Image (cartoon, coloured by chain):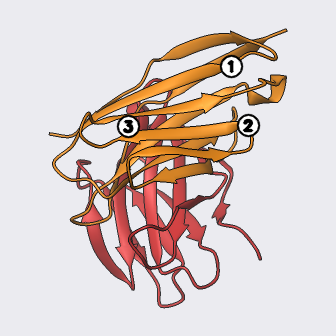
Chain colours: A orange, B red
Amino acid sequence: GQNIDQPTEMTATEGAIVQINCTYQTSGFNGLFWYQQHAGEAPTFLSYNVLDGLEEKGRFSSFLSRSKGYSYLLLKELQMKDSASYLCAVKMDSNYQLIWGAGTKLIIKP
Amino acid sequence: KAGVTQTPRYLIKTRGQQVTLSCSPISGHRSVSWYQQTPGQGLQFLFEYFSETQRNKGNFPGRFSGRQFSNSRSEMNVSTLELGDSALYLCASSPVGADTEAFFGQGTRLTVV
């Protein structure tokens, strides 16, 4: 079967740094997505990692280790608007289907 | 360009009824996927349509069905509604390609009473 694990909830302080982990065990792998979803809204794309390593996009960075089945999303200089759920998803190489984790709810405190 | 449009945004139905949800993808996107989202369960994949053909299917009962039209618009139907079908139903469209992201609509919030 396919399995993707993320912490259910995390709390961090405004201005700080937080790392959200995602581990996966899937029968195939093409790449890993991170999406952000604010309450009551649609998920929006943050990053897509295909190769091992760190990709930086402004305050957000995403890391992938294919050999370890592990990824993380790093958020720097946290702002209140970063309070949201963060979803990781594996794209299968066989049929391009996305397998989703349950999401991590991130709560930012002043 | 216009995003993914889902209608209606909110729906209340009674157990046993059936419902049809609609999704208009971004112009030029031929792949449309449907997901069910409930608190704590994440996004559960229902099915994916590509060029009017169902390409992938999740593990949902046969009460859940869908179709895609020649203009790539898609509909999802749920028959004999159950209380447990109450959820946010999200549609996502994407262009052709292995490394393409999915663009989500705002979803349809279905409540079954």
Which SS class for mark 3?
A: loop
Does residue A80 appear to the left or right of B90 in the view shown?
A: right
Is the residue B72 above or below the residue A30 in the image?
below
Q: Where is residue A60 in the image (x, y as percent from the top left)?
A: 67, 38
Which SS class for mark 2?
A: loop
The three-letter amino acid code for the residue at tag 1 is: Ile
Q: According to the image, label 2 marks what residue?
A: A59
Separation of residues labelled 2 and 3 (CA atoms): 43 Å
Disc 2 packing (10 Å; few <14; some 14–19; many ≥20): few
Of label 2 and label 1, which has the lower sequence position?
Answer: 1
Separation of residues labelled 3 and 1 (CA atoms): 43 Å
Q: Where is residue B69 in the image (x, y as percent from the top left)?
A: 47, 84
Residue nearer the viewer, A84 or A23: A23
Q: According to the image, label 1 marks what residue?
A: A17
User: In front of the other: label 2 or label 3?
Assistant: 2
Residue nearer the viewer, A108 or B93: A108
Residue B25 shows in the view: yes
